Image: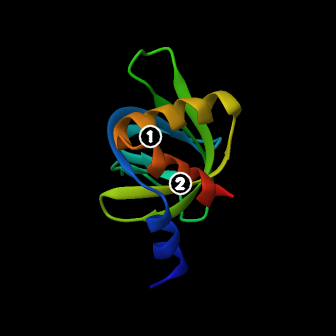
């Protein structure tokens, strides 16, 4: 098992279908969130995606109320034909609050959330 697979399994992913914007500063892509964790996100890969693995991007997730957003600086961790995996590198306090609540509501178990928070260090 690779380090990446071990890290990926340390955080519980929750399915959450939402529109997202991914930008590398030069280009921006609108796509769909597949799932999210406290450590990153999995997205549907747009047909015109041209950002390489390892690149720094900004991910913005639009939440259900259309006024709240989760914004994180992330790294492109992996690319597949149909998906993009992002690893969270930095997130502001308001966004981590929204993300924590989203994960907690979808996990349905506060003990699992606490374990994920401990894994963040």
Discs 2, 1 touching: Cβ within 8 Å: yes
Residue placed most toward the observer, 120 or 111: 111
Residue 96 location in percent, x, y? 61, 36
Q: What element carries label 1?
A: helix
Tell which residue pokes out farthest to the front in this image.
Answer: 111
Q: Residues within 10 Å of mark 1 (few under 14, many from 20)?
A: many
Q: Earlier in the sequence, mark 2 or mark 1?
A: 1
For this view, does 100 lie left or right of residue 72? left
For this view, does 23 lie left or right of residue 9? right
Q: Residue at position x 54%, y 65% from top?
A: 53
Q: Residue at position x 44%, y 85% from top?
A: 1
Instruction: Name the residue beneath numbered marker 1.
Output: 103
Vertical comparison of 42 with 1: above or below: above
Q: Which mark is residue 47?
A: none
Vertical comparison of 77 with 23: above or below: below
Q: Which mark is residue 116?
A: 2
Residue 8 location in percent, x, y? 47, 66
Q: Residue at position x 52%, y 19% from top?
A: 68
């Amino acid at each position: 098992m690779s380090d990446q697979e071990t890290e990926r399994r340390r955080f519980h992913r929750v399915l959450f279908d939402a529109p997202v914007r991914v930008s590398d500063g030069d280009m921006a892509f609108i796509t769909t969130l597949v799932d999210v964790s406290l450590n990153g996100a999995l997205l549907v890969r747009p047909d015109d995606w041209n950002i390489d693995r390892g690149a720094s991007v900004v991910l913005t997730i639009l939440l259900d109320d259309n006024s709240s957003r989760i914004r994180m600086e992330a790294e492109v961790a992996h690319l597949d034909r149909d998906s993009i995996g992002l690893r969270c590198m930095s997130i502001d306090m308001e966004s981590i609050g929204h993300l924590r609540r989203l994960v907690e509501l979808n996990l349905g178990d506060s003990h699992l959330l606490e374990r994920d928070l401990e894994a963040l260090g």
